[in-house]
């Protein structure tokens, strides 16, 4: 018994001796990432982002210390998220705003070049737990105390020594670029905020414009780039449209793609629809496309918006576009306003969230004339996001439905037969 017990103690001692200390794990990672100590100052990766379904072109720039900029390219729209080490902001067609703090906190370790080169400062007090299997690799599993008493899991690849996980952030598919091991897959791989960047090319110490990390200059450059993207998309999808002043307004918007707008325009003009209803105005981008179509057919559009600020912006955009006599924006809860509306409609377009499409269709079904249509934006995700509405438009024998999938959301059109 005593010999057996002694042998167990010996094995335990050997196992303990083989377990690296926190500082050894950090130093091994630093050595593996930048073996020649070449003084990396910047890293530029170009590839795609995968926010759930689909993928879109993206570029990820990073500067030492603690600065990164993610540029996303969508059809007819451009978005950016910037962190300059002191503050974060996002650029979108709707304007400049603050990104979700939770999103920035989760992706920062994956996008931050300073953290890649030396994660030690964030790993102070790290505790090494065990070596175990994780997917197709063995990792040294550790943990470190985070804010608000949260414990942050940390994984190092046992074979390479490279850091592969910090909290929700993952750094994977390392490849050597010059003297640096660069993760070609980085982001948040699972959960509600799943967001993965996959690099197709990378350059170390590439020139990066410092002005990109100053909010004022970044905003000016973003707006110019967004306007150029809008101009190209409008040129592609706007052939034959009698723009008037509307093109200039759409150039400065971009939160509803011209491809999807053209689908609505063509349905309305080809069918000669006269009375339309939109639920969910936002800033009025989609309503301008429909307004141009109804102006051509001699019809009118009523659009409903619950948010007073957005409604005021939309009303001003309709005025600038020369559509104030064609498009009427009403500010109210759609569930309260729809019963007040008189008459029937031959085209109803819905662009709302919170799985409300079926409820709106129930209110309006009897008021859509034979040959009229009900349409929905973000049709690519209808089956998942709006299952009740999806079931209705695909199984109701009185509705003939066409789904047009596009990179920018897609549009469903369901024509009522009788």
Image (tube, rainbow, N blue to C red):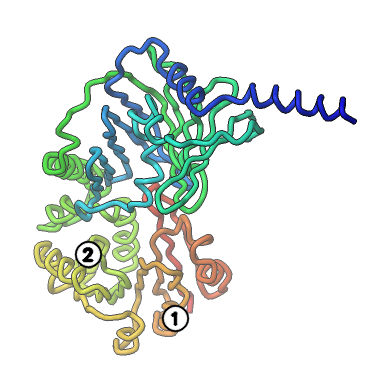
Tag of residue 178 = none
Q: Which residue is at a point 25% across and 45% down the rendered structure image?
A: 88
Classify 10 Å Cα crowding around label 1: few (below 14), some (14-19), many (20 and above): some
> Quick one: label 2, few (<14), some, or many (20+) residues within 10 Å?
many
Residue 212 in the image, given as x and y percentages of width and height: 18, 35
Q: Residue at 22% across / 78% down in the picture?
A: 331
Q: How many marks?
A: 2
Residue at the spot of label 2? 284
Mark linked to residue 365: 1
Between 389 and 397, which is closer to the camera in this rendering? 389
Question: 304 above or below 79?
Answer: below
The answer to whether residue 149 is left or right of residue 105 is right
Residue at 37%, 49% in the rendered image: 103
User: Real-space Cα distance between discs 1 and 2?
Assistant: 24 Å
> In the image, which is nearer the foreground, mark 1 or mark 2?
2
Q: Position of residue 400 (x, y in %)?
A: 50, 68
Q: Earlier in the sequence, mark 1 or mark 2?
A: 2
């Amino acid at each position: 018994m005593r010999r057996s017990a002694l042998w167990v103690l010996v094995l335990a001692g050997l196992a303990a001796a083989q377990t690296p200390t926190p500082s050894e794990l950090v130093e091994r990672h630093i050595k593996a990432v930048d073996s020649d100590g070449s003084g990396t100052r910047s890293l530029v990766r170009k590839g795609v982002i995968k926010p759930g379904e689909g993928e879109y072109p993206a570029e990820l720039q990073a500067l030492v210390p603690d600065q990164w900029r993610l540029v996303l390219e969508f059809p007819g729209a451009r978005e950016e998220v910037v962190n300059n080490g002191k503050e974060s902001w996002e650029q979108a067609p709707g304007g400049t705003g603050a990104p979700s703090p939770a999103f920035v906190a989760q992706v920062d370790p994956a996008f931050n070049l300073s953290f890649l080169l030396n994660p030690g400062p964030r790993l102070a007090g790290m505790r090494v737990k065990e070596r175990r299997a994780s997917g197709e690799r063995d990792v040294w599993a550790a943990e470190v105390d985070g804010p608000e008493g949260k414990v942050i899991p940390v994984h190092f690849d046992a074979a390479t020594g490279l850091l592969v996980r910090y909290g929700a952030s993952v750094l994977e598919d390392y490849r050597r670029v010059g003297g640096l091991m660069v993760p070609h897959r980085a982001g948040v791989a699972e959960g509600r905020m799943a967001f993965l960047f996959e690099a197709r090319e990378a350059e170390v110490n590439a020139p990066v414009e410092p002005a990109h990390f100053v909010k004022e200059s970044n905003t000016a450059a973003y707006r110019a780039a967004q306007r150029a993207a809008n101009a190209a998309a409008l040129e592609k999808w706007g052939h034959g449209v009698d723009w008037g002043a509307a093109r200039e307004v759409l150039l400065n918007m971009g939160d509803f793609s011209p491809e999807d707008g053209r689908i609505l325009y063509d349905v309305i003009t080809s069918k000669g629809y006269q009375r339309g209803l939109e639920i969910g105005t936002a800033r009025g981008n989609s309503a301008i496309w429909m307004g141009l179509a109804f102006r051509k057919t001699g019809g009118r559009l009523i659009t409903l918006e619950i948010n007073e600020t957005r409604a005021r912006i939309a009303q001003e955009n309709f005025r600038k576009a020369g559509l104030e006599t064609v498009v009427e924006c009403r500010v109210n809860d759609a569930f309260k306003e729809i019963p007040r509306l008189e008459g029937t409609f031959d085209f109803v377009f819905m662009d709302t969230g919170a799985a409300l499409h079926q409820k709106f269709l129930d209110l309006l079904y009897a008021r859509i004339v034979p040959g009229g249509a009900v349409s929905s934006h973000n049709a690519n995700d209808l089956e998942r996001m709006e299952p009740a509405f999806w079931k209705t438009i695909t199984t109701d024998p009185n509705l003939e439905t066409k789904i047009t999938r596009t990179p920018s959301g897609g549009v469903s059109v369901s024509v009522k037969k009788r």
